[in-house]
Amino acid sequence: MEPKIEWSRTRKNLFFKCPRAWYLRYGYKSNSTRSRVPSFQRPWDLMLRAMKETLLDRLDDLKEGKEWSSLLVEAQLKSSLQSHLDGSVHRVSEQTQNALLKFSQHRFRLLWRTRILQQLQKRRHAQWYVLDRSEPTQYGIRRLYVTPDLVIRIQNRWHLVRFDMQKSPPRVHDESEANVMVFWALNNDGFSAPGESYRLHTVGWRQGFWHCETFQPTSQSIKQSQQLLEQDMKAMEEISRYGMRNLSLLPLAKSKRTCTSCFYRKFCPGGENLELAKKEQAVLELSAHSLKARN
Ligand code: SF4
């Protein structure tokens, strides 16, 4: 049985960095049967996850009228980081752990001062919700992870907000990636509205600052996002089918950097020497083609 392919920004990013790593992680088995792999993410990425978790917990409490002291913020960041590191394959020294904690505290402090979060603290908006991004959205025949982190009603409009604890430099498809939040809203009765009426916000850390970007979707930009998403998913399905036929010919990582934090590097020829593995793969591919041509 073919695995069901699901779309999320994390999956997409991994797919474009290394189709083989994506296949082993997401394309090989369906979600229901895929065993949970230990966390192979770099300690830095685990620190970002700890920040995100703490942010959502703090927002949940804010919604209920509970304010956190700075000591509580520190304790929550520390305990979340600790629990992520405990489940990680990486071992980090106490010194590194303390340094990670300091980074997260600094970013978190500045994040809490961003305009969107300030407005919530000052109770400017009566209707807002913190959402669980791990909940999938069924959109047509597709299962997508496109839920925003936060939804706020401002002057009869829904504002959909996503927080990126570390943002890459601006890219052409930033807008289309923000647009996917609309698919979640259109699929949820309480938030459904004409596509053009939403406001989309991404709040991301880049080069020492939190950058807030706002997008106004149009019916055309939503359609384009849907087409791009379909293209991604078709490419993923193709790689998934290809991987089932011949794992050794699946494209390897574009950059060595991806391999350094890859869980599969011990069992992957690319993990040792990516360039050499690519050359060997090209030879394998050539002989597979000539065998096929002879038959
Ligand atoms: S080790 Fe490198 S090439 Fe191999 S699966 Fe991981 S990222 Fe891809």
Image (cartoon, grey):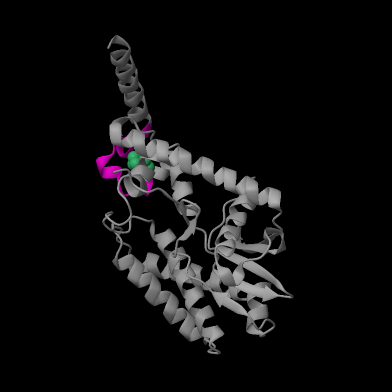
**The residue stretch that appears in magenta:** 260-274
Note whether residue 249 is visible: yes
Residue placed most toward the observer, 86 or 294: 294
Tell me the quarter of the image containing the C terminus.
top left
Q: Quadrant of ligand 1?
A: top left
User: Residue shown at 40%/75% (left/top)?
Assistant: 78
Dominant secondary structure of the magenta stretch?
helix
Note whether residue 16 is visible: no
Residue, far right: 155
In the image, is 61 to the left or to the right of 202?
A: left
Residue placed most toward the observer, 188 or 90: 188
Occupied quadrant, residue 214: bottom right
Tell me the quarter of the image containing the N terminus.
top left
In the image, is 177 to the left or to the right of 6?
A: right
Occupied quadrant, residue 86: bottom left
Above or below 6: residue 256: above
Residue placed most toward the observer, 276 or 228: 228
Residue 294, x across and y down, in percent: 29, 10
Residue 179, x across and y down, in percent: 62, 55
In the image, is 104 to the left or to the right of 91?
A: right
- Please check the rendered image and state whether residue 265 is part of the magenta-colored stretch, yes or no: yes
User: Residue shown at 57%/43% (left/top)?
Assistant: 228
- Please check the rendered image and state whether residue 97 is part of the magenta-colored stretch, yes or no: no
Residue 129, x across and y down, in percent: 56, 76
Residue placed most toward the observer, 124 or 168: 124
